[in-house]
Image (spheres, helix red, strand yellow):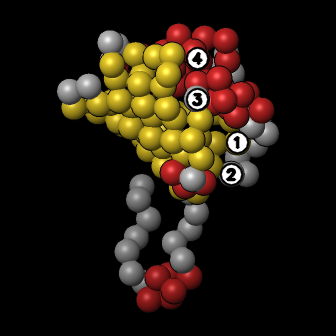
Amino acid sequence: MKKEVVNLWEHINQQNWTHLTAYFVEDAIINWHDTNEQFNVAEFVQANACYPGDWQIQIERLEQIGKLVISVTKVSLSDGKQSFHATSFFHFEHNKIAQLDEYWSEITQAPQWRQDKRIGRRIE
């Protein structure tokens, strides 16, 4: 199942939208919790295909617990102006994704108040 997730991310990275549906069961549910949106597979593919900008995706961590695969990816605009971490929970049935729950966060500097108080340090 980890291989399927790696392959799915590679197709998304290459903007190869026609191959995405093969990784999902027909009635799969995709949830983007940060924006309170739920998609079926066709809508998920459309949302990704229409998403503005040229994005690059790098898998930073990949874990499997039973039929659950968790990935952490860094998603960056090719021009370097914006980047995010996406934490994705892939729930599998019959070796295909039945549900995908994603949580996104923008990669930014620590808030000024923590910098002012010198709390913490950069992750290098």
Element type at mark 3: loop
Judged left or right of residue 83, residue 71 is left
Instruction: Name the amino acid type tagged 3.
Output: Asn
Indicate the position of residue 85 as horizontal and vertical percent values: 51, 48
Q: Which residue is mark 3?
A: 40
Q: Could you tell me which residue is drawn at 54 percent across and 77 percent down?
A: 111
- The quarter of the image holding the C terminus is bottom left
Comparing 60 with 63, the one in front is 63
Q: Nearer the viewer, mark 2 or mark 4?
A: 4
Instruction: Name the amino acid type tagged 2.
Output: Gln
Please tell me which of labels 1 and 3 falls first in the chain. Answer: 3
Marks 4 and 3 sit apart, C-alpha to C-alpha, by 12 Å
Instruction: Name the amino acid type tagged 1.
Output: Leu
Image vertical order of residue 98 relative to residue 26, above or below: below
Judged left or right of residue 111, residue 65 is left
Marks 3 and 2 sit apart, C-alpha to C-alpha, by 27 Å
Q: Could you tell me which residue is drawn at 41 percent across and 25 percent down?
A: 98
Pointers 4 and 3 in contact (CB under 8 A)?
no
Pointers 1 and 3 in contact (CB under 8 A)?
no
Q: Which residue is mark 4?
A: 20
Please tell me which of labels 3 and 2 falls first in the chain. Answer: 3
Q: Which residue is mark 2?
A: 82
